[in-house]
Image (cartoon, rainbow, N blue to C red):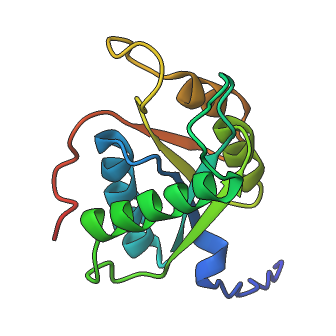
């Protein structure tokens, strides 16, 4: 008779990290709600990320470099408050990062259990079913990707 020992593996919430891309759009807020609900189920944590870049067109409005990051942080904070408020029930950390949204999210997907994005953000063609960030993440992320399209039922408990 062969005896097998089963090693108990303890997990921490960080083992079930759910990364979610937020840009202030309705679908990104729904993605955030879904990510929080998933983290509750798995005993995980949520890392909400917003990115910012300098505009590619020349601006002559007197905007100071730091204002883009400040606006991004404000958008992220408002989105988290609107989507989950104080009733999250799980740890939700926020991160404001400089760079291309898809590249930043793909980097953040390393070691994550899931990457969650909305199907459409603020850019591109509004009639398209999937935005370029979602497409890029779905093709290149290092973990499973969930793409949220429209309102998600049962996430606002």
> Does residue 78 appear left or right of residue 94 in this picture?
left
Where residue 23 appears, as percent x and y from the top left, is 46, 46
Quadrant where the image shows the N terminus: bottom right
Q: Please, is residue 101 above or below residue 89 in the view? A: above
Q: Please, is residue 91 above or below residue 94 in the view? A: below
Where residue 80 appears, as percent x and y from the top left, is 37, 66
Q: Is residue 142 visible?
A: no
- 17, 85: nearer the viewer: 85
Q: Residue at x 32, y 78 (%)?
A: 88
- 149, 71: nearer the viewer: 71
- 74, 103: nearer the viewer: 74
Q: In which image quadrant can residue 108 be found?
A: bottom right
Q: Residue at x 65, y 22 (%)?
A: 57
Quadrant where the image shows the C terminus: bottom left
Where residue 116 appears, as percent x and y from the top left, is 50, 48
> Does residue 111 appear left or right of residue 64 in this picture?
right
Q: Residue at x 56, y 62 (%)?
A: 70
Report the label total: 0
Residue positioned most to the right: 2
Q: Is residue 148 visible?
A: yes
Q: Residue at x 49, y 23 (%)?
A: 131
Q: Please, is residue 41 above or below residue 6 in the view? A: above
Where residue 128 appears, as percent x and y from the top left, is 39, 12
């Amino acid at each position: 008779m062969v005896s097998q020992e089963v090693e108990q593996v303890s997990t921490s919430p960080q083992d079930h990290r759910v990364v979610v891309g937020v840009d202030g759009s309705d679908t990104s807020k729904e993605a955030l709600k879904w990510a929080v609900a998933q983290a509750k189920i798995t005993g995980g944590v949520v890392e909400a990320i917003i990115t910012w870049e300098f505009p590619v067109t020349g601006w002559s409005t007197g905007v100071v470099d730091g204002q883009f990051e400040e606006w991004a942080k404000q958008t992220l904070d408002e989105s988290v408050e609107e989507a989950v408020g104080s009733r999250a029930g799980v740890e939700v950390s926020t991160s404001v990062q400089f760079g291309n949204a898809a590249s930043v999210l793909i980097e953040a997907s390393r070691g994550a259990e899931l990457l969650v994005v909305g199907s459409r953000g603020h850019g591109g063609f509004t009639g398209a079913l999937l935005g370029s960030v979602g497409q890029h993440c779905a093709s290149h992320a290092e973990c499973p990707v969930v793409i949220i399209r429209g309102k998600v039922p049962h996430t606002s408990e």
